[in-house]
Image (spheres, rainbow, N blue to C red):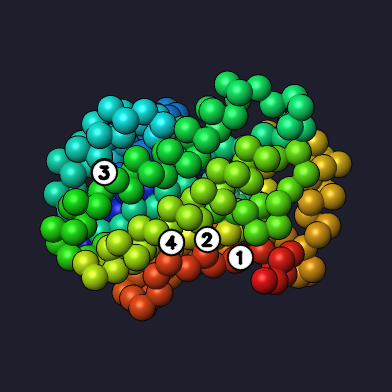
Amino acid sequence: MEGKKAVITGSASGFGKETALLFAREGAEISLLDINAESAQKVATEIAKIGGRAHVMQVDVSEEESVKSAFSQALEQMHTVDILINCAGYGRSSRIQDLTLEQWRRLIDVNMTGTFLCCREIIPHMVERQCGKIVNLASICAQTGRMVAVDYAGSKSGIVGITRALALQVAADGINVNAIAPGPVVTPLFEKNYTTEQMNSLLSTIPFKRKGTPTDIANLLLFLSSDESGWITGEVIAINGGAFIG
Ligand SMILES: NC(=O)c1ccc[n+]([C@@H]2O[C@H](COP(=O)([O-])OP(=O)(O)OC[C@H]3O[C@@H](n4cnc5c(N)ncnc54)[C@H](O)[C@@H]3O)[C@@H](O)[C@H]2O)c1
């Protein structure tokens, strides 16, 4: 990662935060894009303490103008972008009968349209440089479905489709586009969405003898952002402690 420049969305918390800290320890310069600029600033301060470089840009990934402005600031600060990690997202539990159109639209806008907008913003820059790495956050829900999560599972399945189609479009430009599909891992998102009982029930589906951690996720994102994964593209890599083996 030495000398690499990465944009990480959703980097104020959970997987994105852990990934930003790991990439910074590995020598990358990071633009931290998040709707929660205050928490992103705390991550930037942690990165500065370990001698790294980070910039904070407030963004709502579902808003076209906000995404344009954040990426233009990131490019202004870092001059190039080698890596884009699309972590910004959220979930909720609702039976389909209780899900309003407004709730559905907001979740699809953030998770799926947000991924589309961020990819669209960086692709011209990566095509011009004839290199780049993009990793999108899908979920085990796109592979197995999940009770009371048609909106979340739908958005994550959309991200799988975006990843595969974009990988084909830009393969000849030397750009890798992959997704990862994590199983349940305790993060602020997870704690917000589920009761302790629901969390324990989900975590009990994991055959591996320990729970997953944000570090497990960050390590996979590091590999997929590195030169060592240069011939992998269009893949959806499961990371779930054996909860789903497809
Ligand atoms: N935790 C899990 O078990 C799990 C499993 C599979 C997939 N995922 C996916 O991983 C990603 C990260 O999840 P996490 O568990 O780290 O969640 P998290 O809530 O800890 O972090 C998500 C971050 O995204 C930011 N964000 C939310 N909406 C935004 C918006 N409109 N614009 C910009 N930033 C926004 C939040 O402020 C937060 O900092 C999500 O896409 C999630 O769906 C999580």
Q: Position of residue 224 (x, y in %)?
A: 42, 67
Which residue does the image show at 68% across and 40% down from the upper left? 150
Q: Nearer the viewer, residue 119 or 22?
A: 119
Quadrant of the rendered image holding ligand 1? top right
Q: Nearer the viewer, residue 101 or 152?
A: 101
Q: Are marks 1 and 4 in contact (CB under 8 Å)?
A: no
- Residue 189 appears in the figure: no
| Amino acid marked by disc 3 | Glu
Mark 2 Cα-neighbour bin, 10 Å: few <14, some 14–19, many ≥20: many
The residue tagged 1 is: 239
The residue tagged 3 is: 121
The residue tagged 2 is: 180
Could you tell me how far apart the alpha carbons at marks 3 and 2 are, in whole angstroms? 21 Å
Could you tell me how far apart the alpha carbons at marks 4 and 3 are, in whole angstroms? 18 Å
Q: Are marks 4 and 3 in contact (CB under 8 Å)?
A: no
| Amino acid marked by disc 4 | Arg
Q: Is residue 20 left or right of residue 101?
A: left
Mark 3 Cα-neighbour bin, 10 Å: few <14, some 14–19, many ≥20: some
